[in-house]
Amino acid sequence: MKMNSHSDIDSQESIILADIYQFLAYTMGYPEPELIGNPFLDAMEKMLENYGMHSEQQDIDAWRQSEKDEDLSDTLQIEYTRLFINAVPKIIAPPYASFYLDGDHNLQGKTTQKTRDYYRQYGCDITNPHEPADHIQLELEFLASLCRDYELDAEEMFLKTLFRPWFKQFYNRIIEDQGHPFYRVSVQLIDYITKEEQ
Amino acid sequence: MAINLTRRKFLKTASIAAASVPLSKVTAHAEAGVVKTPLIPKGSFKDTKTVTGGICEMCFWRCQLVGKVRDGVLKKIEGNPKSIDNGSALCARGNAGIKLLYDPDRLKYPMKNMGKRGEPKWKRISWEEALDECGKKLKATVDKHGPEGIAMFPHGASAKYPMHYFEHVVGTPNVSEASFFQCRGVRDYAWLSTIGAAPGEHVDMANAKVIFGLGCHFGENIHVSHTKRYLKGLENGAKLVIVDPRFSASASKADIWMQIKPGTDTAMLLAMMNYLVENKKFNAEYVDEYGEGFDEFKEAISPWTLEKAAKECDVPAAQIKEIADLLAANAPNVSIHPGRFSSWYGNDFQRGRALACLAGLLGAFGVPGGFVKGIGPGGFGKVKWGHGHEAIKALHREAKVHHQSPAGTPTDLIRDCAITSKPYPIKSCVVWGQNPIQTIPNQQKTIDMLMQMDFVMCVDVMPTDITMYADILLPEASYLERYDYIKKGTQWDLSAKQQQYVSARMPLVEAEFERKDQVYICNELAKRMGNEEAIPVQTIEEMVDKILEPASLSIKKLNEEDGIHLQPGKDPYGDFLDINFFSEDLVEQGYPGAPTYEPIPDVPKGYLRLLFGRSPLHSFNRTQNNAWLHNAMPENPVWIHDKTAKLLGLKDGDRISMVNSEGVESGTTSHVKVTPGIREDCVFIAHGHGTQNAAMTVAKDAGIDDQKLVTILAVDPETGCHGMRNNFIKIVKA
Ligand code: SF4
């Protein structure tokens, strides 16, 4: 029996939480057309509708109306590259924790190591050792895995010590940039789901 | 916006949402980045391993390294304690290599420019797509315009393999290396035409009685084993003579510092040699035995009295004599340093010739302290591309100019040819590790050249300025993540126990993201351009092993020997080289047979000559974005003489920018260093600062970029190399 202080979240809700994390993780991955197609975007819009995020839903909808289906992932790929990979004049928000937490303009810093250690402590690891473990997509996938296992204390601890300390800076960069609604909306959703209770 | 949406509420609505949105179904096809693994006991990955076999490339000196690696991540770089070259020592840049490795600004995946050239909108694409596009476009250029329709700008060890592909298989002569045309090519060819060999930096300073350096600023210009030789020489009591308009780090240690007027060095050398000849203070025996054309040479330099040179060079005649006497008294054990970067004023071939002749007059070859090449290990294999097209004549050969040009084609000629399409169009451009925007003077012309291309591809480690002009941009594995270069040589002190070493560059860690090595990239291009049968090796490991095999070595063997193979060496002394004091070949090509002084433009009234050089913390622009090196030296102070500063109302620390005599502004600022240690008519800055490329997030706008202000191009007539110090600036208070 897992020890969880989150008595208000039962194991079934925890599975839902896992699904949401998993979904949000993929919004932060490279938008391959096989994944970010209409079913994915429909699901996103449905979520926004259910959460009462109407203007965000309208933004996504307006974008989908304005482009041909086959161009959607192309647009997102250019935007993803600009935000997270390389851009001129510069990328907006490197999606790695250690960029924000370890100072000194670095990837693969102490935080990356701590993050990977945390994964391992809970029986997980990254599948591609050639990319830093503290990419936001991987962190969200890990959170999904914890929730699937109903490890809510571990989830909370991870959020507190390794996720939230950098996420807010990352989030601000994207919101301030006022780029594509897909990424603005995605980080808002991530913010809500990872935010501490007031 | 649902401002009050909290995690709890979110989840509550989520349970309703879950019923209508089957999230797990939408994501079911995706590949997982985090998976369940068997539980690993805590601490299992904490062991730090020492990985041997690294070779530094923070500069071209290539010191031998080991890496401290934990859990696949490089934590620290150290000198390889087994090295008989750099030993366990590395310079600051070598140590900071780790910051390049994990620089967040580095290129990570292949990208395609979906926007305009110069204002790119990048899209990450697959290697397959990127290579297909490059292959198709390059092939189209060859089909339409012939192989000469492709220009290539390579730099560094990784560019050699592709360079040979484009030269020999594709067959374009339009290849231009910055390390030749904007750096040492002119030196190499000047010495080649005088002693029959490129000089490298082969002077036995550790065992010299006098070290003579023209513009050499050891200490600011650091190459570990070279600096060791220099310091050992000083420790052993060598006298140091430094000729430099600036009180450099070496000048501060010198017994004689000659503060010469820029560009007049050859006049001083000619007067010194004339004095030695007239007063019979040269090594007549050596000249008799090994000299060619001495009488013509003697005749040609005879007008150069000490007084005449003193006037030209703005130095006391007595000082020229003092240096000549010092050298003569200690000959032949004197190090006449050939220098390295020698693209100074456009009269540089003659200076190189004069330096080599001076060494000849002193008989300073093959003796302790003189010009001595260590005898390194031999018997290595070669990896050669099969020859495809016979390369057409290079532009300078066709035009019968720059007969002493280094291999490749002078940059200017390629650029002019591309811009004018005369004598033929150049429509594709391959840039491999070079940053022509910051290495080739006159940036606008380089941009014009790029803009008229049908296709531009770049392969690099960082998003340097040139990469903004790429249609396809490919990320290369850095020197810490790949095999390649074989480094071989002898112990650094030529008089110590004779030993030879062999090492090969081996990765300290695996390449991250989707970075690839040059053999992979180039082979894939070759396949797509229809040249598959010419491919000499399938992988980079195969290439290294093929080179090592005839010497009975292999990657495996080197690994077993901690990255460095040692074997007994040979006595390097006794190699007395022939000296071409007067060259009939040069006369035939229309150049002076004996070293000749060619004056350069004077500083116009109201301007200052812009001089630039090295700093110990940076290797040109390549290291400017390195966070450690940047923190240690964020910008390049502008050296201004006390009197000039007073005249301009400047004090130490004032912020300034510059504008050159052609109206080009530096665009960025730096601070003033007021000092008596520079001529009144010059300013000096360290090269390699002041990028305006915002993708270089650390270095952007820090300091002043001298290259931007180098718009007046002097071209060395014999070699076609650039002279870059004939530019004049005014100071603008910021
Ligand atoms: S001198 Fe410094 S930068 Fe150059 S190879 Fe050696 S350690 Fe590296």
Image (tube, rainbow, N blue to C red):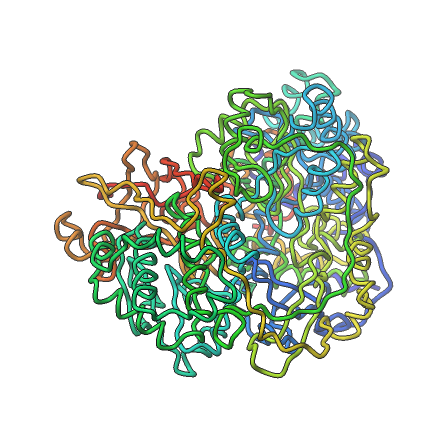
Q: Residue at x 20, y 58 (%)?
A: B307
Residue A83 coordinates in the image, percent (x, y)? 59, 37
Relative height, residue B305 to residue B451 (above, below): below
Give the quarter of the image for residue A31.
top right
Relative height, residue B326 to residue B519 (above, below): below
Q: Residue at x 67, y 17 (%)?
A: A67
Give the quarter of the image for residue B546.
bottom right
Q: Residue at x 24, y 45 (%)?
A: B608
Q: Is any part of residue A153 visible from this angle?
A: no
In depth, the one of A31 and B654 nearer the eye is B654
Q: The C terminus of chain B is located in which quarter?
A: top left
Q: Residue at x 61, y 74 (%)?
A: B572
Q: The N terminus of chain B is located in which quarter?
A: top right
Q: Is residue B143 left or right of residue B362?
A: right
Q: Is residue B196 left or right of residue B668?
A: right
Residue B679 coordinates in the image, percent (x, y)? 23, 55
Residue A11 coordinates in the image, percent (x, y)? 81, 52
Q: Quadrant of ligand 1?
A: bottom right
Q: Is residue A62 left or right of residue B608?
A: right
Q: How many marks?
A: 0
In depth, the one of B23 and B117 nearer the eye is B117
